[in-house]
Image (cartoon, rainbow, N blue to C red):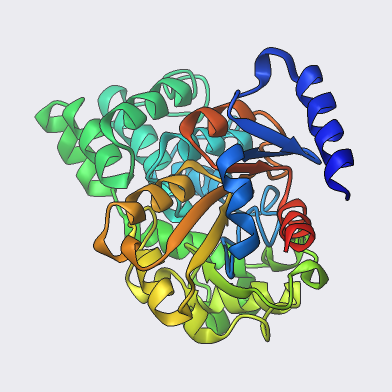
């Protein structure tokens, strides 16, 4: 695209943008890019990808699994009569936006913590009539966000609302390890559970969700000269299966991958620092889809390692979010906000 044509294109889009625009950004084919970043993009030598919402569409998998496990735990272990969903899949987004919930296991446990706390307090016997109304997910996640987010904050918050006898009831059923196991069994399915997690499914039978995650990324669009890394909350086995399905397993060396199995979690900035050591990039773009991904870049910049290389943030609007989070991501300081990862890859290819 010629420079003069690009200028007219930007001007036309900006004039149509109205109050929804952030003034210091340019729109390029539905991408919002900070003006000063346009001068830096030509020297980008690496792109780091999250998997969920970036490489694969997980709107019909992880969020559904979370809702299923909350329901399973409520009916089988909390002994509630099933009269409808306690947590709807789309409500998982509230936890993601609260921060500290990059890992879907933590989302599931945090949701169960509130439900368990409410049952311990008032002795609810059904999933809806006496409990669903009390589980105000919007208010709950809003409070968690105010307190810093994350599972530890959620557990402490729920316990602080309970009297001593109710705390004992809560503790008798609170079992985060079991919840993680249930999540793994449900996601992998009976056939793949051992291959993925090293154990046979005990509580959940049937097929998993592995084949229900459409591939988002077009591997052919990844510029050949870019180093490619992966930073994900998935385990090594989950990430490897995802990369195979996306046609990226040979494009991303093992040493360029950092997963939940490696002992570091987003939004810890050390995750990006470790990838910089193994990849050796000078300027990278990290593409994620939730607030924790943006905060990972922010936290990286506070580390001494940030003096070795620059990392810029990019958030994509996955299928679960649509465009609902665009304004929030821009106001939070994301340098790029894009409809999907392919738009980012095309941008880098055109500029480079």
| Residue 305 percent coordinates (x, y) | 30, 66
Task: Residue 54: name its quadrant.
Answer: bottom right
Which residue sits at x=26%, y=31%? 147
Q: Position of residue 302 (x, y in %)?
A: 28, 52
Front one among 141 and 206: 141
**Residue 153 shown left or right of residue 212 in the figure:** left
Residue drawn 31% across the image and 54% down it: 175
Specify whether 20 is left or right of 198: right
Q: Nearer the viewer, residue 313 or 202?
A: 313
Query: Is 240 placed left or right of 119 in the picture?
Result: right
Q: Residue furthest top?
A: 19
Q: Is 204 rendered above or below residue 333? A: below
Identify the image quadrant of residue 142.
top left
62 vs 291, left or right, is right
Q: Residue at x 56, y 31 (%)?
A: 330
In the rendered view of the protein, which quadrant contains the C terminus? Answer: bottom right
Residue 205 on image: x %, y %: 62, 67
Give the residue drawn at x 34%, y 53%: 301
Q: Is residue 293 above or below residue 153?
A: below
What x and y, as percent, mark residue 229? Answer: 55, 72
Residue 320 shows in the view: yes
- Give the total of numbered labels: 0
The foreground one among 76 and 135 is 135
Residue 261 seen in render:
no
Spot the residue most to the left: 164
């Amino acid at each position: 695209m010629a420079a003069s044509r690009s200028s007219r294109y930007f001007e036309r889009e900006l004039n149509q943008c109205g109050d929804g625009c952030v003034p210091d950004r340019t729109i390029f084919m539905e991408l919002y890019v900070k003006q000063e970043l346009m001068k830096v993009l030509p020297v980008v030598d690496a792109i780091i990808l999250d998997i969920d919402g970036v490489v694969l569409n997980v709107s019909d998998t992880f969020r559904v699994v979370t809702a299923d496990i909350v329901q399973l735990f409520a009916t089988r272990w909390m002994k509630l009569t099933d009269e409808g969903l306690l947590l709807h899949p789309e409500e998982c987004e509230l936890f993601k936006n609260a921060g500290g919930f990059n890992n879907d296991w933590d989302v599931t446990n945090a949701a169960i913590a509130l439900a368990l706390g409410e049952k311990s307090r008032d002795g609810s016997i059904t999933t809806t009539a006496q409990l669903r109304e009390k589980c105000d997910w919007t208010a709950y996640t809003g409070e968690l966000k105010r307190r810093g987010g994350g599972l530890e904050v959620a557990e402490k918050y729920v316990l602080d609302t309970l009297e001593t006898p109710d705390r004992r009831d809560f503790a008798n059923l609170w079992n985060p390890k079991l919840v993680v196991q249930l999540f793994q069994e449900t996601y992998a399915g009976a056939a793949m559970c051992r291959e993925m997690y090293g154990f046979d499914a005990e509580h959940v039978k049937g097929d998993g969700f592995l084949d229900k995650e459409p591939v988002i990324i077009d591997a052919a669009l990844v510029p050949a000269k870019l180093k490619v890394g992966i930073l994900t909350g998935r385990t090594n086995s989950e990430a490897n299966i995802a990369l195979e399905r996306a046609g990226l397993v040979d494009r991303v060396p093992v040493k360029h991958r950092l997963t939940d199995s490696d002992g570091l979690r987003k939004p810890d900035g050390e995750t990006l620092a470790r990838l910089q050591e193994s990849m050796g990039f000078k300027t990278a773009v990290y593409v994620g889809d939730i607030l924790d991904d943006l905060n990972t870049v922010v936290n990286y910049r506070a580390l001494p390692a940030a003096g070795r290389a620059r990392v810029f943030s990019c958030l994509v609007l996955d299928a679960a979010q649509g465009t609902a989070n665009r304004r929030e991501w821009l106001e939070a300081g994301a340098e790029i906000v894009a409809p999907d990862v392919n738009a980012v890859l095309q941008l880098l290819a055109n500029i480079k």
